[in-house]
Amino acid sequence: MSSGHLTLNGRLASLAGVSPHTTALDWLRARGLTGAKEGCGEGECGACAVLVARPGLETPTEWVALSSCLMPTVALDGEEVVTVEGLGAPGQLHPVQRELAGRGGTQCGYCTPGFVCSMAAEYYRPGRGSSSVASDQQSPYAAAPVGPNGFDLDALGGNLCRCTGYRPIRDAAFALGPPEANDALGRRLHEPPPLPTPTRAAAHGAEFARPASLAEALALWADYPEAVVVAGCTDWGVEVNLRGARAAFVIAVDRLPELRELHVTEDSIDIGTALTLTEVERVLHGQVPLLDRLMPQFASRLVRNAATLGGNLATASPIGDAAPALLALGATVVVGSQAGRREVALERFFTGYRESALRRGDLILSVRIPRPVAEVADFVKVSKRRIDDISSIAVAFAVDIDDEHIRRVRIGLGGVSATPIRALATEEQLIGRRWSRETVAAAADVLATEGTPLDDHRASAAYRRAVLRQALLRLHATTVVPQHPAQTQYIGVTP
């Protein structure tokens, strides 16, 4: 087990005596690194962003922007962290800092360091600087512009302050060239990433453990059944910050190799539940149309860089974004404990409000999506803010059409019941019928009656029912049905 160190701005820093409930943000600020700020305490504003070296998909290492307000400091044991102070200094600004300052995007200073770190992560994204694309090209992962330098503005989706206006910030992002050959952080991408560090730390009446293997994690979970299990900590971190939650024991499973595998076979796609949403998004891009529609609406890039499918499902929230999409995909969850493994259909996984089929000692090991996946797909999320907000209602569609007839259909709903549900009555209304305006209009009327939506501060029940009806009508109106189905695939398009 590690004695507790991390590399901070190129220097070794001890974690001895740090409480498992001390966030990385508080720890950094106590050390005098006050560039990172707390704006919201729940990962929604981006003021606390820092860079962390993580295993890459295209290079051995990548610099990933994360919200330091959500991460327990001890969870960074063995990692490499760079704050805004480590990027540049007065008289020797980092290219991101120089462009922001020169183009008037520096803002009041409170949120600027977070912008700098998120922009730096995109600045160093492998392949970003080597491509030249039109400035109005859409991001491969989100409906955000990509600059002529390949800079994807979706990287700033979680940095919410706009007090100078967004144009100078965008101008600065689009002016960045590729990292220079002697850029130390750029060279770091081509070296091996930090290895996962097994950790056991205790301080201030609490204990934190990052086991070395799945077997060890399951044994700890069995020995400490009241422990809290975390991966990206985007949910538990909020509980700690805003509600003062404390756990006597925290078990981190985010770096377990057994939970960080993704397998695509002829029959299924198995997604390890410690893979971040960004990793899933990038690896599967284009292979699962419904996930391509879901991911840009799932929080922000800062959150997706840490959050996992396992964590999102384990909360059993009726308004979790992943559940409706995975219900529509016919997904199952593979659950494991010391007693063995079992597979649970997602539609039977949610047993009540914030309750699931997980038993004591169970961990969600993977999410399994059967193949082939539907080509006609859409994910409709209605919230008060487009990015990084809780949904008022979410609807996911997965439809297979053959010879203009509906061969298979699954519809997942969130925000209309105590649990995420399938719209079974609507599916029955559609299956086997012609994909026509008349069929869809009749089914939309049925969809508007599904679930038991409530009036609350996010939306009224009547509004939620209206959204349900309109979502299906929109899917039909924006779906291109080819004249020769044997030669052309069906494609769901967004206006």
Image (spheres, grey):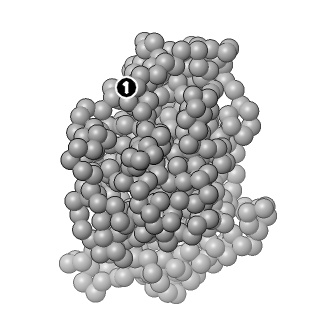
Question: Where 399 falls versus 35 (above or below)?
Answer: below
Res. 165 in view: yes
What residue is at 50 percent from the left and 15 percent from the top? 200
Question: Where 315 falls versus 131 (above or below)?
Answer: above
The answer to whether residue 135 is left or right of residue 315 is left
What residue is at 61 percent from the left and 51 percent from the top? 110
In the image, farthest residue toward the front: 91
Residue 92 is situated, as x and y percent measured from the top left of the image, at: 38, 46
Res. 289 in view: no
**Which three-letter amino acid code belongs to the residue tagged 1?**
Pro
The answer to whether residue 310 is left or right of residue 400 is right
Dividing the picture into quadrants, the one containing residue 164 is bottom right
Which SS class for mark 1? Answer: loop
Residue 4 is situated, as x and y percent measured from the top left of the image, at: 47, 17
Residue 326 is situated, as x and y percent measured from the top left of the image, at: 47, 53
Decide which of 331, 42 is in the foreground and name it.
Answer: 42
In the rendered image, the quadrant that contains the C terminus is: bottom left
User: How many numbered tags mark residues here?
Assistant: 1
> Which residue is denoted by mark 1 in the rendering?
196
Decide which of 172, 152 is in the foreground and name it.
Answer: 172
In the rendered image, the quadrant that contains the N terminus is: top left
